[in-house]
Image (spheres, rainbow, N blue to C red):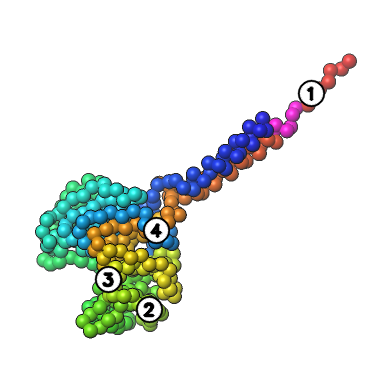
Amino acid sequence: MRKKIFSILCLTFLLAPLFFQTGTLAASSDDWSMFRGNLNNVGTSSTAPATTNDVLWKLDTGIPLGSSVAIVDGNSYVGTNNGAVYCINAADGSQVWKVSISQSYRAAISSSIAVADGKLYFGCYNGAVFCLDAETGNKVWSFATGNTIQSSPAVVDGYVYIGSHDNHVYCLNAGTGEKVWSYQEQGLVDSSPAVANGYVYVGSGVLEDNTDKNVYCLNAATGEKVWSYETYDGVYSSPAVVGGYLYIGGWDDKFYCLNATNGANIWTYTTGDSISASPAVSNGIVYITSWDHNVYALGAQTAIVSSTGTPTWLIGAVIVIAVAITVAVLSIVMRKKPKVKKAKR
């Protein structure tokens, strides 16, 4: 019996690693449901950061991509520069569905998709706002505006942070619109700021004779520069900050992972063309798009969680402990044999 118990215990520990390696992608707490992550539009998340630049998968759409990725319930959504919208399995990169809004170049989707209540919302270069069903891609409604639709500022602790083509990053009072501070870069600011832990992160684009190719970290309260990191070309992508890592794409075809505290380069991944879209981070994976037609998923999948939001490593650990305790109790019980009373003579 003791040998059987010992065998069960050994088998349990041999099977335990499976619980560390399996599971489904993120639950709602790890969703990146719209441009910059959520309604606050600050480009930050409490999800696990991507710590390596390993390519988990990539999908070639055949057309340049300027739209950022949204990730909800295990699917990623992205628009293309020829008016197509893709739904992609976030785990393996397989195409779930694809729809085309229009074949006209005027239908380019540079506005990033927002996902809410089973619907996709996004603007188009032709001036229309679309709503699609997230499960099928079928159009629910569209509304025509008077001009091109693109991106948004970041609404944070009563302040509005926004960049301008006048080379400035502004901090405004959200209630009154009064300027709190401004920081002048040497290039235009297409990049939308990310705000995290008292700092503002933003890129600078090249403008005529100005060659400002930096990623900046500014003090959110004063606008003073904390650090800058120089790339090889303009930075039009908007940054994302997760777990002390800053992620941002460059017009130099490179995607950067920087230390958010001091700006040191942690790793760089080179795509086949420029990157202008903002990255999305979920469950230890960073998702990016490039003008080389591809959607990329980078990172070691080290923080997979179950569909209930409970880390599978924790589930595995609980099972191992429970089995070990059971085996220990059985072992004790087996050692305590009942005493047999001797018959009186």
Which sits earlier in the primary sequence, circle 4 or circle 2?
4
Provide the residue designation for mark 4. 54
- Mark earlier in primary sequence (1, 3): 3
Please state the total of marks drawn on the protein image: 4
Would you say residue 103 is visible in this rendering?
Answer: yes
Give the label on residue 228, or none. 2
**Between discs 1 and 2, the one toward the N terminus:** 2
Q: Where is residue 124 in the image (x, y as percent from the top left)?
A: 16, 61
Q: How far apart are marks 1 and 2 (CA)?
A: 82 Å
Q: In which quarter of the image is the N terminus?
A: top right
Q: Which mark is residue 251?
A: 3
Rendered residue at 74%/29% (across/down): 337
The residue tagged with tag 4: helix, strand or loop? loop
Res 318 quadrant in image? top right
Tag of residue 340:
1
Local packing at callout 4 (Cα closer than 10 Å; few below 14, some 14-19, many 20+) is some
